[in-house]
Image: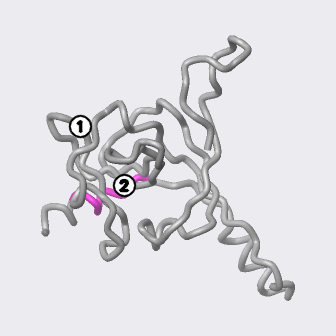
Amino acid sequence: MPELSQESERGRPAPPFGVAEVTGPSMVPTLYHGDRLLVHYGGRVRPGDVVVLRHPFQQDLLVVKRVAQRRESGWWVLGDNTYAGGDSTDYGVVPDDLVLGRVRFRYRPRRSGRRSPWALLGWALSAARPVLSDRSASRRLRAR
């Protein structure tokens, strides 16, 4: 994933969009291991949005989580898979400057070995989708 910076090496502004790849199960069923994401860097963040952020304790590690709610010192983020961990329940509130961008679109690459017409049709119907805000993350937080 490209680093977020104000300018590129040639003095031009950094592009507002970038691509990231999902690793791990923390956002299942919304995102799966291997999914590619289109990230809008610097985009406005609201509760329910899926975002890319720097891990608060390992800032060279980028993670994808859903914003649950605004707190006075930053954002409370949760994974969609409650059993995977690795979210604000482990490391607390994420400061604003660690939230890099909002995920806008998900692309699921085709698996090799699946060449039947039904497999191709199934892939074509589910491969590319916008990643929409889901307000259920906030309700899940209140239910804990």
Q: Earlier in the sequence, mark 2 or mark 1?
A: 2
Task: Report the quarter where the N terminus lies.
Answer: top right
Q: Amino acid at mark 1?
A: Gly
**Residue closer to the observer: 76 or 86:** 86
How packed mark 1 is, by other alpha carbons closer than 10 Å (few <14, some 14-19, many 20 or more), is some
Q: Is residue 111 left or right of residue 108?
A: right
Q: Residue furthest top?
A: 11
Residue 74 — which label? 1
Q: Residue at x 70, y 71 (%)?
A: 125
Q: Is residue 77 left or right of residue 15?
A: left
Q: Is residue 105 left or right of residue 140?
A: right
Q: Is residue 12 left or right of residue 80?
A: right
**Residue closer to the observer: 26 or 136:** 26
Magenta residues, as a range?
Answer: 133-138
SS state under label 2: strand
Q: Amino acid at mark 2?
A: Arg
Q: Residue at x 64, y 57 (%)?
A: 36
Q: Position of residue 104 (x, y in %)?
A: 54, 47
SS state under label 1: strand
State whether residue 38 is above or below residue 27. Answer: above
How packed mark 2 is, by other alpha carbons closer than 10 Å (few <14, some 14-19, many 20 or more), is many
Q: Is residue 53 magenta?
A: no
Residue 66 — which label? 2
Q: Quadrant of residue 33?
A: bottom right
Q: Quadrant of residue 87?
A: bottom left
Task: Work out how far the residue at label 2 is from the one at label 1, CA to CA, in angstroms.
Answer: 13 Å
